[in-house]
Image (cartoon, rainbow, N blue to C red):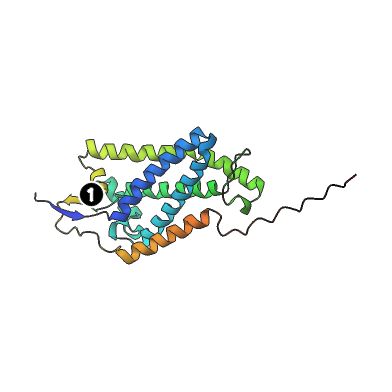
Amino acid sequence: MSTRTIKVWDLPTRVFHWLLALLVVAAFVTGWLGGNLIEWHGRAGIAITALLAFRLVWGVIGSTYARFADFVPGPAHIWAHIRGEWNGLGHNPFGALSVLALLGILLFQAASGLVANDDIAFEGPLYVLVSKDTSDWLSSLHRQNFWPIIVLVSLHVLAILYYAHVKKDNLVKPMITGVKEVSDPEAKPARGGGPAAFVIALLVAVFVAWASTGALLPPPPPPPPAQAVPAW
C-alpha cells in the first residue's frame, strides 16, 4: 500500500508540547526540593500558566488538528475507536481525552499555585485576591493534585509506548517533525494557524504571564510613618 507524507502538527503546537513537558518537570523538581528553589517553582508555574493560555487560544484559531473542534471526541468517535474503526489524524479519541484531562488538571494546578502559600516564606503572586483560609485550602489541593498529574502523565507515556511497540505507530516522531506518513488517499494536511493567529495567541500568553505576576494588582499601601521617640 502506497503512503505519502502530510503535515499534521504545526510548529507552535510542537513547541508548546515540548516546552510544557520541560516546565512541568522543572516545576515538579523545584517544588519537591523546596528551599530557595521555591521561587523558581513559582516562575515555572507562571510560565506554565502562559503556555496553557496560548494553547487554549491556539485550540480555537490554530491549524486543523490542533483545534479542539477537530479532536474533542463524541460518543460515536470513542465507540468507533474501541471497535478499531477510527481512522482519523491527529489525536485519537482516547488520546484527545487524555490531552483534555491534562490541560484541565494543569490549569487548576497553575491557578491554585498563583494564590497558594506555604506559611513560611512563599506567597503566590495573586495571594491577596483570596482569604487566608481559601489560600490554605487551595494550597492543600495544589499539593495533593501532584499525584493525579503523575498518574495522567504516566498513562500518557504508557500509551505512547504501547502505540510504538504494539501498534507500530510512532506518535513521538510527528510531534518532532510535524509530518506523518498516511495511506488514506483522502487524508488532508493541516491548514490554518498562520502568522496572524500565532501573534494573537502569543499576545494573549504574554498578557496572562504579565497579569499572573500580580502586575494588575493595586500597589500595597505605604507603611505607617514611624512615630517619633520622645526625648525624655
Farthest top residue? Answer: 33
Farthest left residue? Answer: 1
Residue 162, compared with residue 178, is above or below; it is above
Dot 1: element = helix
Residue 77's x, y, as percent? 30, 53
How many circles with numbers are drawn on the protein? 1
Quarter of the rendering occupied by the C terminus: top right
Residue 62's x, y, as percent? 33, 61
Residue 15's x, y, as percent? 32, 50
Farthest front residue? Answer: 231
Task: Judge left or right: residue 206 versus residue 217.
Answer: left
Task: Judge left or right: residue 226 versus residue 141.
Answer: right
Farthest bottom residue? Answer: 196
Q: Can residue 147 be seen by looking at this rendering?
A: no
Seen at 53% across and 46% down, the residue is 113
Q: For the residue carrying disc 1, how many other residues have a C-alpha within 10 Å: few (<14), some (14-19), or many (20+)? A: some
Residue 107, compared with residue 64, is above or below; it is above
Seen at 66% across and 46% down, the residue is 132
Residue nearest the viewer, comparing 83 with 144:
144
Seen at 55% across and 42% down, the residue is 141
The amino acid type found where label 1 is placed reads Thr
Q: Which residue is mark 1?
A: 177
Q: Can residue 223 be seen by looking at this rendering?
A: yes
- Which quarter of the picture shows residue 163? top left
Residue nearest the viewer, comparing 137 with 215:
215
Residue 68's x, y, as percent? 36, 58
Seen at 43% across and 37% down, the residue is 150
- Which quarter of the picture shows residue 25? top left
